[in-house]
Image (spheres, rainbow, N blue to C red):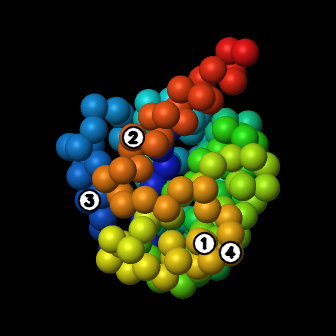
């Protein structure tokens, strides 16, 4: 699997999130750039000032953002269009209904969706997605990795079979 993080960071703030992610994984952690190829066992961080979509296993970066706070939906929708039933979307702590439309699209194409349970610091985003009926797993953040491992084996089997 590849992991793509969308973090709500003010575009003018100098984030150290990529360095923090690098310290907590053995995978390569990279800031997304235009035409960067998506590879398994990599962690990607979307730039704060940009929208990111996927086309033919490559990131497409649009900067500045086209609108405020819809980066996660744009990413999830393109993930669903490109990876179909292999797409996985995870909604963690956050405000409003961001991510719900993208999760609906992932679910529609047969992918899997997660929402953090009530352990989220801010439950609006996961609760909206759950209420919309587009979430397969509602779990505390420390249980998501185990479920992803199970799904990873299933996806790999589907690709070989």
* Cβ atoms under marks 4 and 3 closer than 8 Å: no
Count of marks, rendered view: 4
Q: Residues within 10 Å of mark 1 (few under 14, many from 20)?
A: many
> Is residue 39 shown above or below 72?
above
In three-dimensional space, the C-alpha distance between marks 3 and 2, rounded to whole angstroms, equals 27 Å
Q: Residues within 10 Å of mark 3 (few under 14, many from 20)?
A: few
Q: Is residue 143 left or right of residue 64?
A: left
Residue drawn at the location 45% of the way across and 34% of the way down: 149
Question: Which tag, 3 or 1, sits closer to the chain's start?
Answer: 3
What is the number of the mark on residue 12? none
Question: In which quadrant will I find the C terminus?
Answer: top right
**Callout 1: helix, strand or loop?**
helix
**Callout 2: helix, strand or loop?**
helix
> Is residue 89 shown above or below 7?
above
* Cβ atoms under marks 1 and 4 closer than 8 Å: yes
Task: Write down the quadrant of residue 25 in the picture.
Answer: top left
Viewer-closest of 44 and 145? 145
Q: Which residue does the numbered mark 2 point to in the structure image?
A: 146
**Callout 4: helix, strand or loop?**
loop
> Is residue 96 shown above or below 118?
below
Q: Residues within 10 Å of mark 2 (few under 14, many from 20)?
A: few
Task: Write down the quadrant of residue 136 in the picture.
Answer: bottom right
Q: Which residue does the numbered mark 1 point to in the structure image?
A: 129
């Amino acid at each position: 699997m590849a992991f793509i993080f969308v973090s709500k960071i003010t575009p003018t703030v100098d984030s150290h999130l990529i360095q923090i992610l690098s310290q907590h994984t053995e995978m390569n952690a990279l800031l997304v750039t235009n035409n960067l190829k998506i590879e398994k066992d990599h962690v990607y961080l979307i730039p704060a000032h940009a929208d990111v979509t996927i086309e033919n296993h490559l990131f497409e970066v649009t900067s500045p953002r086209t609108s405020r706070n819809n980066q996660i939906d744009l990413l999830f929708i393109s993930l669903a269009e490109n990876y179909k039933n292999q797409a996985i979307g995870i909604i963690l702590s956050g405000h409003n209904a961001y991510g719900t439309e993208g999760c609906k699209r992932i679910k529609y194409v047969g992918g899997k969706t997660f929402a953090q349970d009530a352990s989220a610091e801010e439950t609006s985003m996961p609760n909206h997605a759950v209420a919309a009926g587009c979430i397969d797993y509602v779990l505390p953040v420390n249980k998501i990795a185990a479920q992803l491992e199970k799904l990873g084996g299933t996806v790999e089997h589907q690709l070989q079979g």
